[in-house]
Image: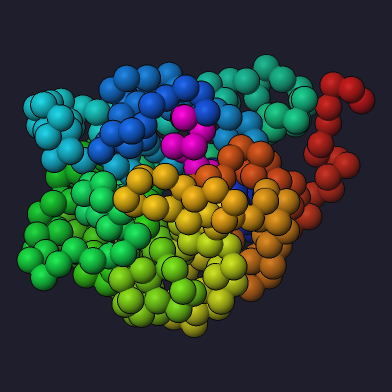
Amino acid sequence: MDTSLMTEFLRKSGGAAVIDGGLATELERHGADLNDPLWSAKCLLTSPHLIRGVHIDYLEAGADIIITASYQATIQGFVARGYTKEEGETLLKRSVEIALEARDIYKSRCESTPSDIVDRIVLKHRPILVAASVGSYGAYLADGSEYSGNYGDAITLKFLKDFHRRRVQVLAVACPDLIAFETIPNKLEAQAFAELMEEESINIPAWFSFNSKDGVNVVSGDSFVECATIAESCRKVVAIGINCTPPRFIHGLISSISKVTTKPILVYPNSGESYDPVIKQWVQNTGVSNDDFVSYVNKWIDVGASLVGGCCRTTPETIRGIYRSFSNKRGLSLSDTILTLNK
């Protein structure tokens, strides 16, 4: 396993890289009905072309890393929907294949288009990574518990490792560039992921990303710093960070992580909107605008983040704004890189 993958990737990316944005929001905007326990993973069954299209949208907005549609995809979840274990594994692999296909399509477009950006679409030769998403046990439950981290006393370290083991193995076999353990809500699950990565013969590097609702702890109330320390101690983890967290907390959390790690720090917050797990909807008018979100980016880079993107409710427009903010950080001039057909 190449643990230098992220360091080399960032070097080739000019020191900072762009992660993609929200998947479910965009799938719904394109007509997908995600009112289902599988959430965005439902489209692996019903409309994989929509997933591929959203991946391409993010690449064309400037994303350097695209995350697969497997956050809520589990073998147990597919079996509960009437599929066999083997069919569930095939769908997990398909999530990675769709992202790899999107990358190939995007690269072919870059080869056939001379300009870096045409009609606000980024067509630029650059390193692009595919990250296979692994959501928490709470995401499988589909009851909002990934936002509380409260699994109850019956859920043990062994249970969580057994729950995730085969899923992680299957995703790794599909050959993504890395595995993204996302929205980790408590220390127990962080430990489960770390031990799985060490115990299993998984030769794919990983990142660990936690969520917080107070800027000090992960959502369960466990210390954010203690969770980051678990990730730091896992030799297969190549980046540590924060996702699905309001933008206002990110600056302080980056500072906290930087005290316990020398690994690259990644941040991909949500829009700041509140999610109501009872009605399974986002509460309107509780977040920040795209412009406000993007205005934070250079401050996050200045305090230590090197990979920035968006999570729930962020869009290709958000990512395009981050890409433009990054131009100066990458030693590029916007006037040199932003070309349109109108010029």
Residue farthest along the front direction in this orientation: 279
Is 236 left or right of 67, judged from the image as shown? left
Residue placed most toward the observer, 278 or 343: 278
Q: Give yes or no for residue 26 being in the magenta stretch.
A: yes
Residue farthest along the bottom direction in this orientation: 259
Is 186 left or right of 281, judged from the image as shown? left
Q: Please say whether residue 23 is visible from this viewpoint.
A: yes
Magenta stretch: dominant SS?
A: helix
What's the residue at 70%, 56% (across, down)?
292
> Which span of residues is magenta-colored?
21-28
Quadrant that contains the C terminus: top right
Q: Where residue 94 sits: x, y (%)?
A: 30, 27
Residue placed most toward the observer, 299 or 11: 299
Q: Give yes or no for residue 298 being in the magenta stretch.
A: no
Q: Quadrant of residue 233?
A: bottom left
Q: Where residue 131 sits: x, y (%)?
A: 41, 44
Q: How many marks?
A: 0
Q: Where residue 187 sits: x, y (%)?
A: 27, 72
Q: Please say whether residue 323 is visible from this viewpoint.
A: no
Is 157 left or right of 211, judged from the image as shown? left
What's the residue at 46%, 30% (across, down)?
27
Relative to 249, residue 53 above or below:
above
What's the residue at 45%, 78% (across, down)?
216
What's the residue at 47%, 22% (across, down)?
31
Is 264 left or right of 178, judged from the image as shown? right
Residue placed most toward the observer, 299 or 114: 299
